[in-house]
Image (cartoon, grey):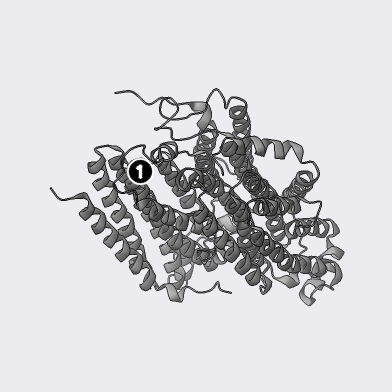
Amino acid sequence: MTFPTLNFPVIAPQIVLVAAALIILLADLMVANKRILGWISLIAVIGALAAVFVCRSDSAAFPLALGGPSGPGTMALADGLGLFASAAVLIAAGLAILLAIERVGDFSRFEKPGSEKKQARSGDHPIAEAPGPQVTDRAGAYYALLLLATAGMTAMATASDLMTIFIALEIFSLALYILVGFNRRDLRSGEAALKYFLLGAFASGFFLYGIALIYAATGTTSLEAILHNIQPMSISLPFRPLLPVGMGLLLVGFGFKLALVPFHMWTPDAYQGAPTPVTAFMSVATKAAAFAALIRVLAAVASYDRPWLLALAALAVLTMTLGNLAALRQTSLKRMLAYSSIAHAGYLLIGLAAGNQLGVEGALYYLLAYTFMNLGAFAVLLAVQRRDENDVTGDRILGLAGRQPLLAALMAVLMFSLAGIPPLAGFFGKLYVFSGAVEAGLAWLAIVGVLNSALGAYYYLRVTILMFMAEPAESDQEISSGKVETLQPGWAVMTTVVLAVLGTIVLGLWQWPWTQTIAQAVSTLALR
Amino acid sequence: MVPISYYLILSAILFTVGVVGVLIRRNVLIIFMSVEMMLNAVNLTFAALALHFLSLNGQIFVLMAMVVAAAEVAVGLAIVMTVVRHKDTTNIEDVNLLKG
């Protein structure tokens, strides 16, 4: 019996993240100032990002993590694709932590259960003097869960075995279920968590059954071995017909996680009910991890065959169209962005449906662009939402430009990028995936995508118009005249927004380093 | 010896029962049990395939899936509890603040 060899550099980011999460859980018991925990987790994320880059330079020397030499038994693979998606996830995690550092108390503090009851009872028993409600701050748990979710996502991005993909998926899903329901005082947070959990667990069942059927069909769960075994004449496989069934079930599971229509029912509810920093994080990081895994699975199991690509194209059309149409009629900006993120999953899927070099490269570029612009947009929502709320309606941003010109201008840039207006990153992302579709002979898909972008531009530009051309709403005029508590976004929230906007602009204007990295990442994949 | 296909068919039936349970029942806890049933149906598939391929991998997957299911129970019941504390109901239709 051979002892499995561990290649530590490949799993270094996960080691850093999990270790930091455990340290934070311990430190949470000793540290009174919870902000320190935020800085520790930010350092951990930066450390993990550094580890990703170190792996990158050594990726030729250390292509494998677990299980001996190249081939079956490899559980994780630090190739270009995995490292690129890991980097996107880590950037999202870093920005989400920075975003939460000032505002985490809004949703992590709650009165100890029981202390309320004592107060209520104190009327009946005047002798037992009730103590004031004891406030507990669970900010430490927030940071620890965020780091664990990030560890799961980076693991999913680098996984090269269906079982690793499943375990990683569950690691980050479980952490996200808790994060979505983190605000215990707000029933909507709990409801969002309940819906997300039930549908997520349901999807996990499909995902696992898909893996089981693929295992039945091919006798292995290693993506590399699957690709080898399904070649004609390699070995006899009595259950070979189960392969497409398994792939279909796997696609359903991915569809739930990526919020593709018709598996998107949980998305608007979960995104709206979750605390805003959590929404910002999960809307981008989950997609980066799951898309990386989907790209790998498609290459191994479906070998980018025509019928599967057409199925993806159909999903993309549904996802874009329904996402955009539903976003049009939202009054809550958070819910609007939730539907818009569904639509963006559709654009990303176009790149995969094209199945060629250009399309997948475009999808990866879009993924990074989307990370910056969507996270930035949610950060702006956090900046304008009050401490006691968890949502932003359209009239809150009326005339924002008059009160907070910088914030309004930054939001406008993000909206332009989401709408796909050159020269911002969102435009080039769409350009790449659409040209990938045209190159693959799916011109109709590109046309549907362009039409959908026009539809999307309507509600993104409406936000801009509301900010710059409308008078403040009645309730907010008092705020601008200084009568009511002002809505000053803290410096950390502003820094996050500025970083996100910078990312959007830099990615758009200064392309070659990114496109080159992506081209290298994609070149090792077996595409059409 | 029972042929492998019997196991696969049985687990497919169990899985379908779980799916139908999730779709038609309205009690959160029953939905939850149906999800667990789906996962256990998959476990049966894995165990049967481990015998069929004479490899340990399938059995290891069963253990992994069981760990995942246990973790899911821990998180899921906690979430159900937070909602029940607010609303005192386990009917999914009554939990309807978010819509649109």
Furthest-left residue in this view: B1
Relative to A57, is B72 on the left or the right?
A: left
Where is residue A199 shown, x and y percent of the image? 45, 62
Where does the image place residue A214, in percent across and percent down from the top left?
Answer: 37, 48
Chain bearing tag 1 is A
Residue A418 sits above or below residue A157 on the image? below
Q: Is residue A226 visible?
A: yes
**The N terminus of chain A - image quarter:** top left
User: In the image, is residue A17 above or below residue A285?
Assistant: above
Q: Secondary structure at mark 1?
A: helix
Vertical relation: A262 (above or below) A527:
below
Residue A44 visible in this rendered orientation of the protein: no
Q: Amino acid at mark 1?
A: Thr
Name the spot of residue A14 as percent of width and height, x first: 52, 36
Left/right of residue A350 with respect to residue A71 in the rendered view: right
The quarter of the picture where residue A237 lies is top left
Give the residue furthest to the front: A233
Residue drawn at (66%, 64%) of the image: A448
Residue A392: quadrant of the picture: bottom right
Q: Is A172 placed left or right of A466 in the picture?
A: left
Q: State left or right for residue A470 relative to residue A364.
A: right
Name the one closer to the observer, A211 or A181. Answer: A211
Percent position (x, y) of residue A371? 66, 49
- Sort mark 1 into few (<14), some (14-19) or many (20+) by Cα contacts within 10 Å: many
Q: Nearer the viewer, residue A368 or A221?
A: A221
- Decide which of A286, A60 is in the foreground and name it: A60
- Which residue is labeled 1 in the image? A218
When the figure is inspected, residue A459 is found, relative to residue A104, above or below; the finding is: below
**Count of numbered labels shown in the rendering:** 1
- Quadrant of the drawing holding the C terminus of chain A: top right
Could you tell me which residue is drawn at 52 percent across and 41 percent down? A151
